[in-house]
């Protein structure tokens, strides 16, 4: 049995409210559970850039209500239609992609936003908190992205020798985009948190130039009906969910990257807040903010701090980082220390949302030193998720026997 806390924070009148504890019991750890639902078309055309007045209307609505963060209950959900699955194409590390941007179309009529949004400066920065919260007392959580089927969770846990706390999966807006309710038996029903990387893309298109998924389209309301249904299904699910839209936005390998498809950090913030607004009455869903450990391009305007949506909209902050072993072995501290230190400025619990090491003679040491020792230097890191797939590299914990043993040793202490 593993005890873990499902947390959330909110900032009200400048005061940090402590998370609502949620007891998570016996978690089944599996292979990277990847979600695919019914194939849905992605007939969303490229959207015009909204006027400054439109963005201002979204950023300053008349309704001052902020998204609420409440406790959650466990209950049955309706039976889901069987899913059709395919391999995903999440890129945990960038490789060269086209950076062409779409040609703007005529200005759309602005639509009202469901998300309450305070004014955003040109380059939003985290506000220093004089009484920085301490999350070191939180029970540490671990999880994995384990494969294509919910059944992979059980397989992975048998390999790891211990149930996990968090089951990770992917949902793409352009296809097989429904809420992944078929994970209920291996996540919700086992008191595990379901972590969803909510990705604005059509994974069948081998290009990141997909302007129909850009932030202008979100701000203009083109995805509102989808958000409404997804939030409704997430609420009916009733289990604990961490939803992460637009992960690794400071990279350049996704349609929602901040430097592609007409996107900017300011539009990212508006789009994130707009999507979050649909979940203000969905208490079992918490929102994560996942940056990449390296910004690509590495410029001042693309620093991940420029993308922070605000304390009112984010429940957890986190980072993705990998040791690729591409001509240079990157130890755990080189991958994570700088980005985690920067994330500690925010009054939120920190997760390493996606991580792994490529094969090598030191992989076992990388696991044991990183998650057994180095992570303890960062008191506000409350959990981590392993990317267990043989993709660009063999990221799996059992790529060799020493690495598997090191992984088992690390999680035995959690």
Image (spheres, grey):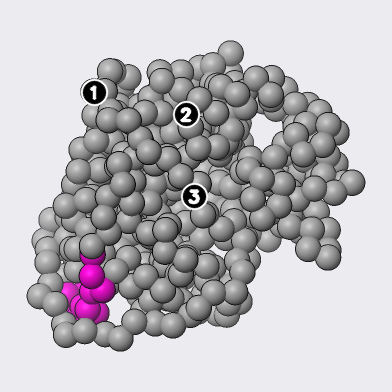
Which element is circle 1 on? loop
Give the spatial CA distance, label 3 vs label 2: 15 Å
Q: Residue at x 41, y 28 (%)?
A: 183
Left/right of residue 266 with respect to residue 410 in the rendered view: left
Q: Which mark is residue 78?
A: 1
- In the rendered view of the protein, which quadrant contains the N terminus? top right
Q: Which mark is residue 150?
A: 2
Q: Which mark is residue 125?
A: none
Q: Residue at x 51, y 60 (%)?
A: 248
Q: Earlier in the sequence, mark 1 or mark 3?
A: 1
Q: Any magenta on residue 53? A: yes
Query: Residue at label 3?
Result: 88
Q: Main secondary structure of the magenta part?
A: loop
Which element is circle 2 on? loop
Q: Which residues are magenta?
A: 44-55
Which element is circle 3 on? loop
Residues at badges 1 and 3 in contact (C-beta under 8 Å)?
no
């Amino acid at each position: 049995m593993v005890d873990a806390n499902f947390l959330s924070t909110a900032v009200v009148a400048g005061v940090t409210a402590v998370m609502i504890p949620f007891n998570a019991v016996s978690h089944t750890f599996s292979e990277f559970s990847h979600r695919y639902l019914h194939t849905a078309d992605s007939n969303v055309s490229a959207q015009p850039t909204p006027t400054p007045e439109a963005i201002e209307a979204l950023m300053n609505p008349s309704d001052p209500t902020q998204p609420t963060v409440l406790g959650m209950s466990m209950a049955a959900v309706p039976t889901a239609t069987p899913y059709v699955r395919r391999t995903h194409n999440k890129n945990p590390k960038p490789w060269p992609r086209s950076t062409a941007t779409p040609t703007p179309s005529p200005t759309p009529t602005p639509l009202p936003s469901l998300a309450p949004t305070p004014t955003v400066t040109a380059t939003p920065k985290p506000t220093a908190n004089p009484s920085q919260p301490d999350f070191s007392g939180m029970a540490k959580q671990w999880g994995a992205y384990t494969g294509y089927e919910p059944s992979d969770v059980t397989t992975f846990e048998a390999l790891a020798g211990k149930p996990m706390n968090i089951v990770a999966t992917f949902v793409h807006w352009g296809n097989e985009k429904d809420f992944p309710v078929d994970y209920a038996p291996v996540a919700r029903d086992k008191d595990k948190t379901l972590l969803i990387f909510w990705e604005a893309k059509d994974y069948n298109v081998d290009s990141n130039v997909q302007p129909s998924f850009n932030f202008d389209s979100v701000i203009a309301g083109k995805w509102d009906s989808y958000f409404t249904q997804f939030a409704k299904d997430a609420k009916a699910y009733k289990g604990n969910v961490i939803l992460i839209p637009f992960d690794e936005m400071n990279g350049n390998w996704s349609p929602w990257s901040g430097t592609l498809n007409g996107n900017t950090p300011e539009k990212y913030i508006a789009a994130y807040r707009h999507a979050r607004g649909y979940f203000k009455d969905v208490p079992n869903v918490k929102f994560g903010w996942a940056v990449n450990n390296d910004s690509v391009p590495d410029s001042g305007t693309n620093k991940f701090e420029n993308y922070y949506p605000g304390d009112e909209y984010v429940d957890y902050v986190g980072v993705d980082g990998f040791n690729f072993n591409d001509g240079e072995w990157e130890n755990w501290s080189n991958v994570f220390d700088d980005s985690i230190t920067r994330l500690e400025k925010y009054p939120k619990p920190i997760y390493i949302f996606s991580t792994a090491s490529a094969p090598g003679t030191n992989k076992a040491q990388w696991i044991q030193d990183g998650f057994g020792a180095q992570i303890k230097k960062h008191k506000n890191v409350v959990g981590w998720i392993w990317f267990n797939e043989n993709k660009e590299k063999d990221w799996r914990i059992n790529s060799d026997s020493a690495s598997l043993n090191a992984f088992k040793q690390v999680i035995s202490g959690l």
